[in-house]
Amino acid sequence: MPMNTNPLLAPWDTPHQLPPFDKIKPEHYAPAFEAAMAEHRAEVDAIAATTEPATFENTVAAFDRSGQSFARVVGVFFNLTSSETSDALQAAERDLMPKIAAHQNWLSLHEGVFKRVDALYRTRDRLGLDPEQLRLLERVHLDFVREGALLVGAARTRYAAITEELAGLFTTFSQSVLGDEAAFCLELKTEADRAGLPGFVLDAAKSVAADKKIDGYAINLSPSLVDPFLTYSTRRDLREKVWRAFKARGESCAERDTRPIAEKILRLRAELAGLMGYGTYADYALVDRMAKKPAAVNDLLMRVWEPARARALTEQKDLEALAATEGFKGPLSGWDWNFYAEKLRQRRFKLDEAELKPYFQLDRMMDAMFDAAGRLYGIGFKEVHGVPLYHPDVRLFEVRSTAVDTLVGVFLVDSFARSTKRGGAWMSEFRGQSRNRPGGLEYPIIINNTNFAKAAAGKPTLLSLDDVRTLFHEFGHGLHGLLSNVTYNRLAGTSVLRDFVELPSQINEHWALTPAILKKHAIHAQTGEAIPDRLIELIKKSEHFNQGFLTVAYTSCALIDMSLHQHPNPEKLSLADFEASECKRLGVPEAVGMRHRLPQFRHLFSDNGYAAGYYVYMWAEVLDADGFEAFEATGDVFNPELAAKFKRFVLSAGNTLDPADAYRAFRGRDPDVGALLRGRGLV
């Protein structure tokens, strides 16, 4: 396919050089990748072939600058395979992922470039580099080493084979879970099937049915619909059916059984770690994390685990006592917890999620997060219409500095669940921020994806409190990408250590429910009235309600992830047996269970990013809880001095600073672990 006819390779004469979504088809990716990878290889070979002595500019900066066409194609491909896939695109993904992995291997194992980088690294103290240049040199060198550059002979060849095989397995795992999610549909055909469901759940169920070409109401496996269904449906049999389907993703049918795939991934990871000289994959993964060692992770998790488990068991007794007053007999099951927890919350706090939800309209809550960001960081958001995007639900915003009216970045928002989109919520980029991009735009194009249950046409989409937190969480990641202000691509935005990357997202959640934001933006969908002080006070009073359940559901996953990736003999590991034995060893209450069971645990098995790394949310929670306490201590949660420091040393600094140094520069000291326990009400 000629370059000028392939929209992925032709110049993008679109606003902000956005991808020409309306022109891109699945068949364009293979030739685009072939051409972009060839161009990238030529650029990198030229760096190695130069006869001039290695310098920072002709080697490290040039390497950082290379591959712009490849990055452009990758940005579109990875975003659309997650957000708007199809049979044809999934077929292309299965074909291309091993080829992309092979290209990445070629880069990381390039002896000529590594030789030059290594020579500079060994003399780095004598090169007169500024702090950002030195940081880039050190990071690029570490990247090469961690990706096999020091391996030789058969070990080098085997490393490449493992990473390419893993790329294919990750794709198969992700597509299998998505297939299970897309296959499930529970029709609510009668009034009895819909018993107990409030209007906002019925609106969402009607939207799901319409998407599936059903006249009526239906439940899919989006958490934004599963959770309220389990909370309000008085049909225990249907709650059980939905709960079991949700928990069975990844093992519901033989052709999409992810367990042998995950077992193979674990064996390959263990082999890779051995090639790199580490005893386990966890040891290998944590070298480039703040935690450094598995013992440090386990110490933190166990400090939380025991009080959380005790709290969850107390919560279960309270729920069973309440259920008994309504004639319920027997122990509580997983499909009962939300139902009785909501009843208990209403009884204790006079707080009804159904009463709250009309105040949390999606559009209003987006205004709220933009408002909070404006108060803290001096930026504004203007929606732009008329630009072709990849789905009608996607919205486009220009982000500008309010002080000098300069463009900061472009922000896309894709809010709703659909069968062509993977579950969960995430931030990504089509283009990262960089000043090392000659002829290209410096500012980033960032996207937030969520999977909220879309309301029926003409009605506002209403969010739960958890949904609001998710919205602000992902926007924290978005701000990390949008406010990046560095020179080099490798150090930009969210390219930080994995257990630091969740700080911007998690601290941003704290502003979601501050009274100033709620009074302005939590407007009732029917009456137009602002949320009353009574409800704001009740939200605050109930913030630790059900915290045992929530903490156990998360921490069990993090602990089992660490055990899984420290397994002494993964060759003989059975995923099902391991999960069961670990839950028994930890004493995970059956009615609580794991937030993500292993057969559907995309954090662990759709790539390597969170493998031996699901703990990072709690590690970062120490930072975010301690950091927000600093704002609270000033008496102004929008304190401009602290906000300026957080922007400078965290959001804008990318990976130019060591994360521990960055946090100290913002906070003035190391974080206090007690802030996490206080924040969760576990002390």
Image: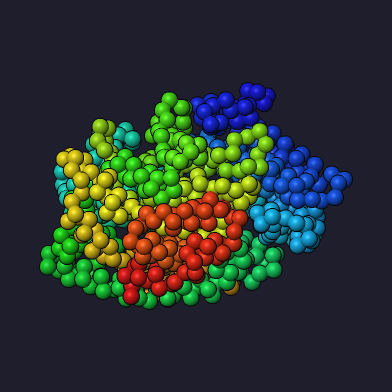
Task: Work out whether residue 629 can be spotted.
Answer: yes
Quadrant of the rendering where the C terminus is positioned = bottom left
Between residue 436 and residue 572, name the one nearer to us.
436
Between residue 80 and residue 530, name the one nearer to us.
530
Total marks in image: 0
At 61% from the left and 55% from the top, the residue drawn is 656
Q: Locate residue 484 relative to residue 206 in the image: left or right.
A: right
Horizontal and vertical percent position of residue 645: 48, 56
Q: Locate residue 210 relative to residue 69 in the image: left or right.
A: left
Quadrant of the rendering where the N terminus is positioned = top right
At 30% from the left and 55% from the top, the residue drawn is 514
Residue 76, image quadrant: top right
Between residue 513 and residue 282, name the one nearer to us.
513
At 50% from the left and 36% from the top, the residue drawn is 407
Q: Please, which colouring scheme is shown?
A: rainbow
Q: Locate residue 248 relative to residue 575 in the image: left or right.
A: left
Residue 636 vs 405, above or below: the answer is below
Task: Work out whether residue 173 can be spotted.
Answer: no
At 76% from the left and 39% from the top, the residue drawn is 42
Horizontal and vertical percent position of residue 280: 61, 69
Horizontal and vertical percent position of residue 405: 47, 36
Residue 591 vs 141, above or below: the answer is below
Horizontal and vertical percent position of residue 177: 45, 50
